[in-house]
Image (cartoon, rainbow, N blue to C red):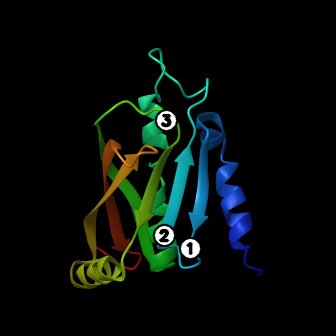
Amino acid sequence: MKLLSQRRRIKLINYYPPFIGAGVKVTHLSKDFKELDVAMKLTWYNRNLVGVHFGGSLFSMCDPFYMLMLMQVLGRDYIVWDKAASIRFRKPGKGTVKAAFRITDEKVNEIRTHVAEHGKGDFIFHVDVTDSGGDVVAALEKTIYVRRKDFKG
């Protein structure tokens, strides 16, 4: 089976209907899936009643990425699910906002080690949504559930 090019992977993600509706764009995806950047411009369809980014759009621009990245990084022997999330709005989002998702080799090793010992586990990831000045607009915490497919527990 032919692998998709990085450019095509990004296009595929960007054409996901909820992202089109919110104006979310993946701007960078590393070949190893450990780095992913997204951006969202302020437009009439993601603006709330007071003229700043709608909170739901800020959340949706961050929702699936750690799960999708971990699925690729860990491989087919693991089940990966979003388990919980929380968002804290820090200041109004104006203009273009961005989020940078990173999974370190240390975090991957921590997950693999824990799951090898316990069969499953919950893992916490953080990401900040920032504005063009680098100020934090929203802070998200994601809990990702990971288990080995062969775990019987």
Q: Distance from label 3 to label 1 (Cα)?
A: 24 Å
Q: Residues within 10 Å of mark 3 (few under 14, many from 20)?
A: many
The residue at the point 53 percent across, 24 percent down is 47
Q: Which residue in the structure is indicated by mark 3? A: 57
Crowd tier of the residue under label 2, counting other residues whose Cα lies within 10 Å: few below 14, some 14–19, many 20 or above: some
From the viewer's perspective, tell me whether residue 56 is left or right of residue 30: left
Where residue 27 appears, as percent x and y from the top left, is 60, 58
The answer to whether 130 is drawn above or below residue 126 in the figure is above
Q: Looking at the image, which is closer to me, 120 or 88? A: 88
Q: Amino acid at mark 1?
A: Ser
Q: Would residue 22 be found to the left or right of residue 103 on screen?
A: right
Marks 2 and 1 close (CB-CB < 8 Å): yes
Q: Residue at x 63, y 34 (%)?
A: 21
The disc labelled 3 sits on which kind of residue? Ser
Vertical comparison of 124 with 55: above or below: below
Q: Look at mark 2 in the image and give the residue it sits on.
A: 35
The circle drawn on residue 30 is: 1
Residues at discs 2 and 3 in contact (Cβ within 8 Å): no
Q: Quadrant of the N terminus?
A: bottom right
Question: 145 or 38: nearer the eye?
Answer: 38
Query: Callout 1: 10 Å neighbours few (<14), some, many (20+)?
Result: few
Instruction: Compare marks 2 and 3 and give the one earlier in the sequence.
Output: 2
Observer-nearest of 53 and 144: 53
Of residues 40 and 32, which is closer to you in this image?
A: 40
Position above or below: 53 against 153: above
Q: Amino acid at mark 2?
A: Glu
